[in-house]
Every structure is written in structure tokens, then in C-alpha cells.
Amino acid sequence: MPNPSFSQQDFEEQLNQPDNHAFIQSLKQYSTADLADILMALPINDQIRLLEQLPQASYVFEFLALTEQQQLAAQLPQALLVKLLAHMHSDDRTDLFQSLAQEVQGQIFPQLDAHVQAQLNDLMHYPAESAGAIMSTEVITVHAEMTMQQAIQHIRQHAAESETLYLIYVTDASRYLHGVISLRQIIQSPPEQLIGQVMTSHVITGLVSEDQESIAQKLAHYDFMALPIVDEQQRLLGIVTYDDAMDVVQQETTEDILKSSAVAASPQMSIKTAPIFLLYKKRVFWLVFLVFGSLLSGLGIAHFEDLIAAHIVLVFFLPLLVGSGGNAGSQSATLMVRALATGDVHFKDWFYLLGRESLVALCLGGTMATAVSILGYFRGDILVAVVLAL
């Protein structure tokens, strides 16, 4: 078990006691992350029992990775799944709901409250890679005409509904975004001072149609905990929080790594649970393609076949030459994938970067040719050195 206070056997025994109320209440002292780890280590029957009895069950369930949520959702009683969905944040709820089979969606949707149904309908129509697809609509707003005291009372009333309270956004009745004010500013200001007198009018925002990766880069650049998402009319629709942005960065980085390794897999695919045939299908095409691509190296070797036969010492250097080419390619691919992931380079820079990499390749090739030719000279003669350098 992840938490040292319990062994898995002890945890299961206490969970299955007829009178386990005190035990369940004691779990409130543990972090959501620890409880999520504990949950995933339990057998399915105990997972269901824990989620049914734990007061903060929706927060624990929401903390799980989407693939883990999917595995659990497929085995949970429908009533429990509806309860968990109802109390999840809108962005995480939408991700899980969209991953369910259409038949299950059709059974669950009518059982959800009207406002939850409305949120799902709103969020599901946004493109998969857009800010709208990952934003949370649970955000507290205040009006510029409010006093600090009124704002504090308003925040207290709605705090449980919001995903974050670090920044409070200032809107009007039509949700037009006028400014932003921090919770610290509200607390430190005189109670009768107006929000509009303290708020910052210049607000960094993201468009609802903006790419997720761009949103994540904005959050990292400005060191924000959350970024407000608006439509073309500057109306506040929701926020993207830092943890959601980090999920996007992880997903994009995984996607770049998979592409650089010639694996046609989805970043969400779990290697632990994916079917064997799916893993085979995602990898076989590029492996076969690369096999035929490697024939080009064979053609180069075949060109020097007679020379190799006459100077058998050249065989000693074949693994070195092939390996050096692969290492150089891996270096370039790693640098480029990392630069793409961090936003340091973009697709429009390809011609400029091709020129730079070509110059670097010439320098590296010259250095390696010199080093290998020296080895070839001492292992053979001047002809071997020249062939290896070429």
C-alpha cells in the first residue's frame, strides 16, 4: 500500500467491517493522491465499497488518470458512476463521459441533473485539441460595483463550486470580462473599497478555439495558476488550470516521443492494458517501412563489396559506421522533438533548421571521418583510411 499507516490486508479488513464508520472518517486525514493510490491497489469489490462510503469519493476518483477512470467506470454500478460524475469538475467529467461507450452514455445522461447535462452539451461540441475541450466552467466571478466585503461573502457562498480561488474574475451581467483581482487583494483591501478600484483591467486570456498546447505555453510563460478562457466577444466561458495544462504538456510530449520512435500510438494508450494485437498494429507498419529503408545502407555496403572482400579489415568497422549514423540521427531527433515540445521551434522554421542541421552534420561528419580514418590507417593502410572516411 502507498501509505505506511496501513498494510493492504489491514486496510481491506477494516473496510469490510460491518461498523467501519470510524475507519472511513479517519481517511479524511489522508491526501487525495494517497487515497487514489490506495483505491487502485484494492480488489474491485473493495474499490466499489470505498467509493460508495468515502465522503470525498468524487475527488479521489477525479484524481485518477483517465485510463484508470475508464477501467473503474466499466465495472462500477451505474448509480455510483452517475453520483461520481455529478460531483466531478466539468472538464474532467466531460473527458470521462466522452470516453464511455455510446450505449452507456445514453443510459447515464438522463440520470444527471439538468445543469450537468447542459455543461456536458456545451463542452462536448468543442474540438478535441481546443481550449474549450479542457476548460472548467466552475469559476467564481464578481462585479466591479461590489465592495470587498460583498465579494468575500459571495466567494464564501460559491467557493465549493469553483475549481480554484487564487484569482477572481470581474464580469458584468453578460459575462463580459472586465478585469481580474486576486483573493489576497480582496482580503487585504478595506471592506468598503470597490472591486473596480483595485482590479487589473489588462487580463491575459485564451480563446476558446485556441490550441491546447498554446494555452499550456501561456500558463507556463506567465506563471499563472489558471488562465481565463473567452469567446470572440471577450465573454468569460471558463478557466484552464495549471494541472490541466500539465496534462496537455505530458500528452503532447508523449505524442512527440512516440512519433520520433515511429510508433503510431495514441498518447492516451496504456501499454499495460492495451490489447496485444493493438500494440502489434501500432508498431508493425513503421518497423517494416524502416526495414526496407535500411536497405539503403545495404546498397552502400554492396557498392564497396569487392573492396571489402580484398580488405577484410573493413568488416571490423561496419558496426562502428552503422552505429555512428544511428547515434547522430537519434541526437538530432531528440533535440528537435524537445524543441518542438517546448515551443522553441515551429513548423515554419523547417527550412532554416534544415540548413543549420546540414552544417552541423558536415562538421560532425568531418570530425568522425578524421577519427575513423586514423583508426583505419593503423588497422590497415591508407586505402582503408580513405574508404572509411568516405
Image: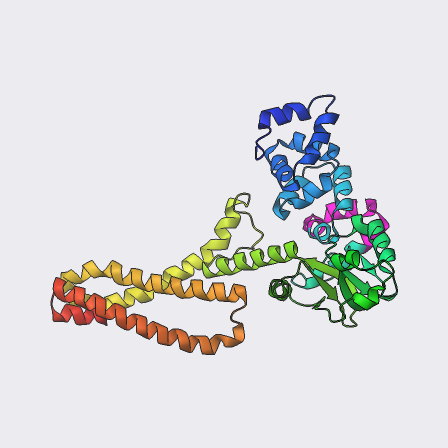
Relative vertical location of residue 181 with respect to residue 79 in this rendering, above or below: below
**What x and y, as percent, mark residue 124?**
74, 58
308 relative to 4 in the view: left or right: left
Taking the spot 36% from the left edge, 76% from the top edge, the residue there is 359
Magenta-highlighted residues = 96-118
Total residue callouts: 0
- Along the viewing direction, whichever of 326 and 253 lies nearer the viewer: 253
176 relative to 132 in the view: left or right: right
Q: Secondary structure of the magenta portion, mostly? A: helix
Taking the spot 68% from the left edge, 26% from the top edge, the residue there is 15
Furthest-front residue in this view: 190
Tell me if I can see residue 163 in this picture: yes
Q: Is residue 77 magenta?
A: no
Relative vertical location of residue 250 with respect to residue 84 in this rendering, above or below: below
Colour setting: rainbow
| Quadrant (top left/top right/bottom left/bottom right) for the C terminus | bottom left
316 relative to 73 in the view: left or right: left
Taking the spot 66% from the left edge, 30% from the top edge, the residue there is 46
- Along the viewing direction, whichever of 295 and 57 lies nearer the viewer: 57
**What x and y, as percent, mark residue 114?**
85, 50
Taking the spot 68% from the left edge, 37% from the top edge, the residue there is 75
Q: Quadrant of residue 209?
A: bottom right
Tell me if I can see residue 304 in this picture: no
Furthest-top residue in this view: 18
350 relative to 139 in the view: left or right: left
**What x and y, as percent, mark residue 292?**
37, 62
